[in-house]
Image (tube, helix red, strand yellow):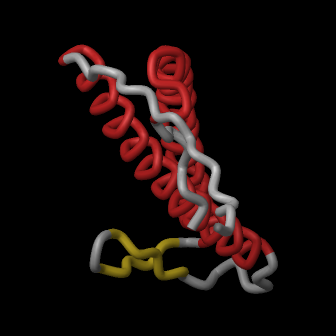
Amino acid sequence: MAATGKKTVAVEDVNVTFEDQKKINTFARNTNRMTEFKDEIEAKKKSLQNLQDASDDLMMAEDDTLLVPYQIGDVFISHTQEETQEMLEAAKELLQQEIKDLERKVSTIQQVLGDLKVQLYAKFGNNINLEADES
């Protein structure tokens, strides 16, 4: 008879209580929220870079008397360069604040996830995978 090289791994039978299920669900919900917040942060950072590029281009303009079209909603309204620069600065400050708020939310969620990971891995060990897929 040939010996097979398979290893048997003992999987513990761990009862999942209602409280455990609530923790697992909370972990999943928070992971999804964090992913959404991170995506939103990236989108806002791109918008912020676009505003910065527009501001830089506006500073390099030679003619100060030109009216600059600025998009508000679906409409473009012409303003002086100075007014447009002020509007760009205000929009950048607003985006920077929104990014900080989202980053704060992500940080809070990461703390919650860290606590839940400790609790869930302590009970379930290798029988549960709480690591994000990098695919």
Residue ranking furthest to the left: 18
Q: Position of residue 69 (x, y in %)?
A: 47, 81
Q: Position of residue 97 (x, y in %)?
A: 54, 38
Q: Classify residue 20 as left or right of residue 126.
A: left
In which quadrant is the C terminus drawn?
Answer: bottom right
Question: Looking at the rendering, which quadrant does residue 120 occupy?
Answer: top left
Q: Is residue 46 visible?
A: yes
Residue for point 57% across, 28% down: 107
Q: Is residue 97 visible?
A: no
Q: Classify residue 20 as left or right of residue 1.
A: left
Q: Nearer the viewer, residue 121 or 14?
A: 14
Q: Nearer the viewer, residue 49 or 60?
A: 49
Residue for point 76% across, 82% down: 61
In which quadrant is the N terminus drawn?
Answer: bottom right
Q: Nearer the viewer, residue 3 or 5?
A: 3
Question: Looking at the rendering, which quadrant does residue 93 occupy?
Answer: top right
Tally the marks.
Answer: 0
Q: Position of residue 22 (x, y in %)?
A: 24, 23
Q: Nearer the viewer, residue 115 or 64?
A: 115
Residue for point 54% across, 57% down: 133
Residue for point 54% across, 82% down: 67
Q: Position of residue 29 (x, y in %)?
A: 31, 38
Name above or below for residue 39 compared with residue 72.
above
